[in-house]
Image (cartoon, coloured by chain):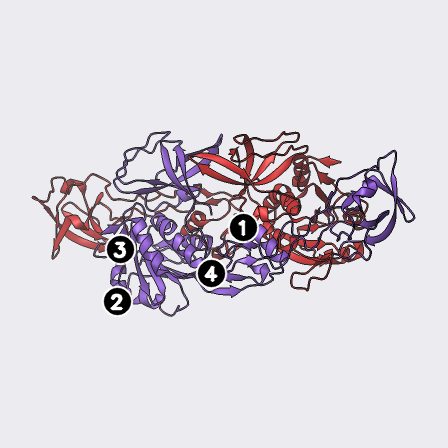
Chain colours: A red, B purple
Amino acid sequence: MAISLEDAMTILLEKVKVQEKVYTPLEDCYNRVLAEDIIADMDFPPFDRSPLDGYAVRMEDVEHASSLRPVVLKQVDYVPAGSWPSKNVETGTATRIMTGAKIPEGADAIIRLEDTNVHQDMVSIFTATGANHNICRQGEEICTGQIMLKKGMAIKDGALGILAMLGKSRPLVFKKPKVAILATGTEIVAIDQPLEKGKIRNSNNYMLMAKVREAGGEPILLGQVQDDIDEIEKMLVGHEDVDMYITTGGASVGDYDLMEQLFSKLGITPLFTRLAMKPGMPVIAGCWHDALMVALSGNPASANVSFEVLLRPLLRKMSGVEFLERPRAQAKLKKAFNKKSKSRRFIWARCENIDGRLHAEPIGYQGNGMLAGLLPANALLDISEGSSCLPIGTTVEVRLLVD
Amino acid sequence: MAISLEDAMTILLEKVKVQEKVYTPLEDCYNRVLAEDIIADMDFPPFDRSPLDGYAVRMEDVEHASSLRPVVLKQVDYVPAGSWPSKNVETGTATRIMTGAKIPEGADAIIRLEDTNVHQDMVSIFTATGANHNICRQGEEICTGQIMLKKGMAIKDGALGILAMLGKSRPLVFKKPKVAILATGTEIVAIDQPLEKGKIRNSNNYMLMAKVREAGGEPILLGQVQDDIDEIEKMLVGHEDVDMYITTGGASVGDYDLMEQLFSKLGITPLFTRLAMKPGMPVIAGCWHDALMVALSGNPASANVSFEVLLRPLLRKMSGVEFLERPRAQAKLKKAFNKKSKSRRFIWARCENIDGRLHAEPIGYQGNGMLAGLLPANALLDISEGSSCLPIGTTVEVRLLVD
């Protein structure tokens, strides 16, 4: 019995666990998943600072200053960036201050250098100012106690900058789930071996390697093995640190497909043996030791879709990511899809924004084995069971192949 | 004089070169940029093959077969996947065949196992078939001579699968451009150092590291250095294999900004010293040996925008990628942007598809120094010079922060 993708997902999401956490040097954290909330233990800026080179003054001193009638103040201090004022700004005085430097006590505005002139220790101010002008306030960007970053977020440029600002040189991130990938099939040879008659090369290892990486996992390529239960078993044992095993081939439900027999030999109870969808129907899943064992079709495109819609969200959960699924949207068909869909169908498509509207173009002919259709795809159309042909302009559900 | 972003781009695109090419093991090629067209030197499938387990027959033999009146044929051969037929299928005979196996000469259709019954060497066929039924034709996916992959494409799952299919175990990819990143500023300390009074931590190294990685480059973190031309020079020399240097800080055009002096000391003629846009205005660029030297603002958000709109396309060109720029689109403002824009302005925003239409929400207050606004952003609004306040519903230009 085929079960729905959603039921399969519910079953498997219950079985998989979020990875362990590990302190990791910040320079290795790009694209890793944060495993702790980051709460600011300081303000940023950590002190009131000047956004430009100029003079720190008291507003009341310069309220009548103009280019014709400059106000002259006595310079009492100089604060380059990285230093600390040694004097307060009292009435009639000013402090020279550089970009990023601490604003001295007593000053309530910064006059930019271009509006001043200095002769020995006397500074002419040629403009008036409002209070708080050109002052970056302590805590303006980050306030002590504020949750700056949330557990489960992927660490990109902004988060890396904030972690650095706060001195989190070894944040806690989730370990990447390890995914072992094995292609089964007597017809399959390694990619650098001569191609004898009747053989094809192991493309599934590499295609799935990319999918696993993209999902945040760490792929382990086990290569290929002939259609022999004992040989398949030999290839799979001895990788106890693996979190998920994916095999391709032998996963249909005919008498000559070995994977159900393998599950039985390994003592794995299949949770289900196929999904009610095309392509990607053959999926046998079960638990083996602490890992998930999943057998997919040997057809690359079929295995790809099964991975995309079922295994990717699981890997995302294991990786600790907050949002498991791809963003969904509605799009208008740019080209008719002239095929009835008896079962639910996923179709690779190219989505494009035209004048603010999303349009989707289904890509070429899609046999189970076709990988070329994947190349331009940036979305999957999700076509319901029992749909008729879809004329141009039909609104369709799409899953966008972005984070 | 500030020049337009587009003029700056034109100037710099002429100065940068595409990286050298290097043969690379396929397992290391995920997300690398292909440096050669891949032309199929074989058909795929390499032979006519069966998509399922069944019997290879001659259509004319079974045209009257039905469940009530089966046709009985003599099994003459058995072809498991990975082997080659030893006999042709003659009138009155059939060959047992497994998924993926070569179809014997003489057969023109495959009857699936479920529609047959076998007793000793006699096979009962319970269904008629059309010609070519269940036959995957040689070359159906890939034809000899066809250009399968184009130079300049990023290698993702589909391309990896196709490279493997064709036995390209060491494709030619472009070397990643190396980008050295140095933060200047006496106020800046390393992220794992104690934060003395008046100091802040080096967030720009890490923020730009992420930007460089995302753009396909290889970041080299040079750390931080005080505002001292000799010290800055010392940090920059001795990295002769670097393709681009990015410094932050000291890039404004006041008297106290050092980077123009540094350029002069290093003998670099600035190609321009600022861009007509906000944030991200301070950008001093020139050529140093075979590399590009670029000084950005010390304000993280300003440096981020300069990188995003100017340096990223350059790095993409150096990486060999075909499409340099982010995709652009039009979106409706979900929230008003109540600020006039004297100069051109880039504003971080969150774009979302609602009922097939793109909507953009500008993110919070954006001072030059603000990194928090980056966290939820997936787009940049591009607001023209001289724009008034933009009410809700206004159609705006956005750059989507995806490939």
- In percent of width and height, residue A210 lies at 58, 52
Whether residue A21 is visible here, answered yes or no, is no
Label number found at residue B265: 2
CA gap, disc 2 and disc 4: 29 Å
Give the distance between the C-alpha atoms of the residues marked 1 and 4, in whole angstroms.
Answer: 26 Å
| Chain name for mark 4 | B
Q: Is residue A129 left or right of residue B38?
A: left
Q: Label 1 near label 3: C-beta < 8 Å?
A: no
SS label for mark 2: helix
Residue B176's label in the rendered image is 4
Identity, as a three-letter code, of the amino acid under mark 3: Thr
Reading the image, the residue beneath label 1 is: A173
Quick check: A229 above or below A356? Answer: below
Label 4 sits on what residue type?
Answer: Lys
| Number of marks in the rendered image | 4
Image quadrant in which the N terminus of chain A is located:
top right
Which dot, 2 or 3, sits closer to the camera? 3
Residue occupying the point 47% across, 57% down: A27
